[in-house]
Amino acid sequence: MRYVSTRAAGASQAANFSDILLGGLAPDGGLYLPEEYPRVSGAELDAWRRLSYADLAYEILRKFATDIPDDDLKALAVKTYTPATYRNARADEAATEITPLRVLEDQDGKKLVLQALSNGPTLAFKDMAMQLLGNLFEYALAKQHAELNIFGATSGDTGSAAEYAMRGKKGIRVFMLSPHKKMSAFQTAQMFSLQDPNIHNIAVEGVFDDCQDMVKAVSNDLAFKARHKIGTVNSINWARVVAQVVYYFRGYLKATSSNDQKVSFTVPSGNFGNICAGHIARMMGLPIDKLVVATNENDVLDEFFRTGVYRVRKSAETFHTSSPSMDISKASNFERFVYDLVGRDANRVRALFAKVDNGGFDLSGAPGSDGDEFRRVAEYGFKSGKSTHADRIATIGDVAAKYGITVDTHTADGIKVAREQVEAGVPMIVLETALPAKFNETIREALGQDAARPAGFENIESLPQRYVVMEPNVEKMKTFIAAHTGL
């Protein structure tokens, strides 16, 4: 399996999985995708129904990481996906099931299902990929006798998942940017309370997009990136997206009994990484009917999937909401989908994304637009919807009253939009984002009581915190990184 950049015409720069594992962005600023998606047969799906999550992960990963020996890849999957690591399941969930399904509604042929993804060490779906990424990084660095300085950005959950996966890893340092005072108290404490010397938290005076822009700027400085051995764990990292593909297959196989059946997925979306993995699963042949993008008030993606206009907002126009991990107005992984949408024309992608800093682009086909590819969106199964603070408060209350479970604010956005899109005969699976304890302020508003906390997190906000506050200045950020890498 070889990989190409979304912005590189031709295959002259094609690379192996291990070549791109540690790097993030391609040298030309594009994102990596396979030269072609591997296909999954009906016989394989039948066989995979009987597998553990770890074995399923191995079967899917080996289609993408063809340059890693099978025995090594299987050992990495088995090491990562254990019940001991993903232990924070609710009492009614099977202890050995990594991503259990729960039917919420089944009426008039319309079935709404919740897939739990937040049983890992930081209580968010990001653990599903980040735990594997930590083990892959350690494996690759040991092979190369090398070091890596991870430079990433988070709107809340990516940062803690990355830091918990990388803390104590030999040869790895983490520099994680987050928007200052724009995460929940739990999310902030989960990151900033880590005292490991290889973890550096930087609170940026701005919004997530400011953090993400700095990660891309540093990654595009190829000389600095090489000298300081910069890598990334954001969802621009291909290995992270591949790891997320696994739970789409798992959800489908658990929700169906025959490959003749289809399911749909609704995914709370900010940076488009999570649902991009669903797009890849569908391109591999997984019988997915619809992929529903659920946004909050920062509805850049919903606007595109309704109109064909990708209108990027500036930092001052980005809302700070009660589902803060989706407070994103410039979705990095969207470029991967656009690459497929425009027929894998790298020159076209480069031209379109050159417009993003000036406000975005228009594929609606209207007079004066940048093209008419929006007409092809339906071929890829995408739909979308939007949820507001009032919607998520109402949904949290309704789900608690009807089903006796508490969902977090982002998952509530997903459920709200899923209810608008579910169709008879096609189960709708909502991907859970996080456990509600991470957003207790809004849970208390919705339910009048605190969210339950897994053991070990009872007083996390009272722990000492270690971080620095910086302005969104790329040169000052480089100086900070250089001072702490010793390179």
Image: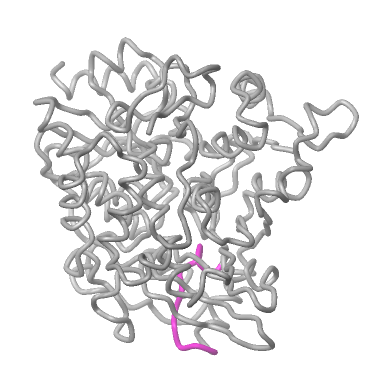
464 or 475, which is in the foreground?
Answer: 475
13 over 431 or under it: above or below: above
Indicate the quadrant where residue 190 lies.
Answer: bottom left
Colour scheme of the picture: one colour
* Residue at screen point 22% across, 28% down: 149
Magenta-drawn stretch contains 405: yes
Where residue 253 appears, as percent x and y from the top left, is 44, 69
Where residue 330 appears, as percent x and y from the top left, is 57, 37
User: Can residue 461 be seen?
Assistant: no
57 or 86, which is in the foreground?
Answer: 57
Tell me if 258 is positioned left or right of 230 in this view. Answer: right
Tell me if 71 is positioned left or right of 331 in this view. Answer: left
Farthest front residue?
Answer: 43
Q: How many marks?
A: 0
Farthest right residue?
Answer: 367
User: Can residue 360 be seen?
Assistant: yes
* Residue at screen point 15% across, 31% down: 141
Where residue 456 appears, as percent x and y from the top left, is 18, 69
418 over 91 or under it: above or below: above
135 over 451 or under it: above or below: above
206 over 487 or under it: above or below: below
* Residue at screen point 16% across, 47% down: 71
471 or 51, which is in the foreground?
Answer: 51
Location of the C terminus by quadrant is top left
* Residue at screen point 23% across, 63% down: 460
Magenta-drawn stretch contains 183: no
Where residue 144 appears, as percent x and y from the top left, is 13, 26
Location of the N terminus by quadrant is top left
- Segment colored magenta: 402-412
